Image: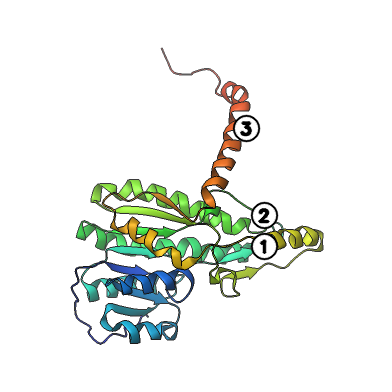
Amino acid sequence: MAQQHAADTGTVTTPGKVWFITGASRGFGRIWTEAALQRGDKVAATARTLDSLADLQAAHGDNVLRLAMDVTQPDQVAAAITQAHAHFGRLDVVLNNAGYSLVGTIEEASAADVRALYETNIFGTLAVIQAALPLLRAQGSGHIIGISSGLGLVSLPLIGYYCSSKWAFEAIHESLAMEIKPFGLHVTLVEPGAYATEFGSAQSLKFAPSLDVYADFRTHFMERLQSSEGGDPLATSAALFAVVDAPEPPLRIFLGSQNLPWVRATYAERLATWEQWAPISDAAQGTSNTPH
């Protein structure tokens, strides 16, 4: 079960925002948790182990509520959301950041590895969203932030299954935004480019067993990835705050300067191909069967 470690277990009121952040122990989750606390907001910070959040409690006292939560365990997720809401009296921003990447070609990765990836990246996210929505609807306000990626729009080899989880992530949040807008709730997909975070660490990567036939391709691709320059993750907090403070936040926003040129070129190529094949596509419509 989720555990609460805070001096005051009653409701806390604040003029700032109240955040619920998954994956708060490292990477972007840690950076944004600390930045929110430093600007005077309250944060329910979740991670698999409370020890990884111990210093937050020491530094920020009652402004932080540490919760042990595994996003792949729906009961833990529901308990943590309920506890955070009861503790702070409301939730303004629900930020889904927990996730990892599976490295392997489409042929190499096992079905079990792909299911495990989706349990965290997709079903874990859904558990948080579905647990939070009744509370946000009752408030009449709230902002769901999904941490996606430029790879939710453009895919790459060797991490195709990770990309696929982000493509699904994007579709789910786009539909969600339309469904909950009438309740006064907002949704934003945050799409970082390459950053110098811990996402390349052993905790954030799982490798599928490799086949020799892909060895050269893998070596060259990984060398290219490792040589690319990552952005400064500490520079991202201001952009995130601009989004959550906006009266009409965007559905999508890139973090960093790399994604827009890359996505623009990719979509130009896609559109050109669709246009080239439009006569064949249109012919496949057939004749109308609508009665006259």
Q: Circle 3 — which element? A: helix
Q: CA distance from mark 2 to mark 3?
A: 21 Å
Q: Position of residue 58 (x, y in %)?
A: 34, 87
Please state which amino acid type lies under the numbered disc 2. Pro
Badge 1 density bin: few <14, some 14–19, many ≥20, Cα 10 Å: few
CA–CA distance between discs 1 and 2? 16 Å
Q: Nearer the viewer, residue 142 or 165?
A: 142
| Res. 277 image quadrant | top right
**Position of 81 relative to 249 (above/below):** below
Q: Which residue is the site of mark 2?
A: 157
Residue where numbered disc 3 is placed: 273
Circle 3 crowding by C-alpha within 10 Å: few under 14, some 14–19, many from 20: few
- Dot 1 or dot 2, earlier in sequence: 2
x 43%, y 71%: residue: 31
* Residue 79 appears in the figure: no
Q: Residues within 10 Å of mark 2 (few under 14, many from 20)?
A: some
**Amino acid at pointer 3:** Thr
Q: Which residue is mark 1?
A: 227
Question: What label sits on residue 22 in the rendered view?
Answer: none
Q: Residue furthest top?
A: 292
Q: Secondary structure at mark 1?
A: helix
Answer above or below: position of 236 versus 285.
below
Q: Specify whether residue 268 is in view.
A: yes
Quadrant where the C terminus sits is top left
Q: Position of residue 239 (x, y in %)?
A: 39, 58
Task: Report the coloring of the rendering.
Answer: rainbow
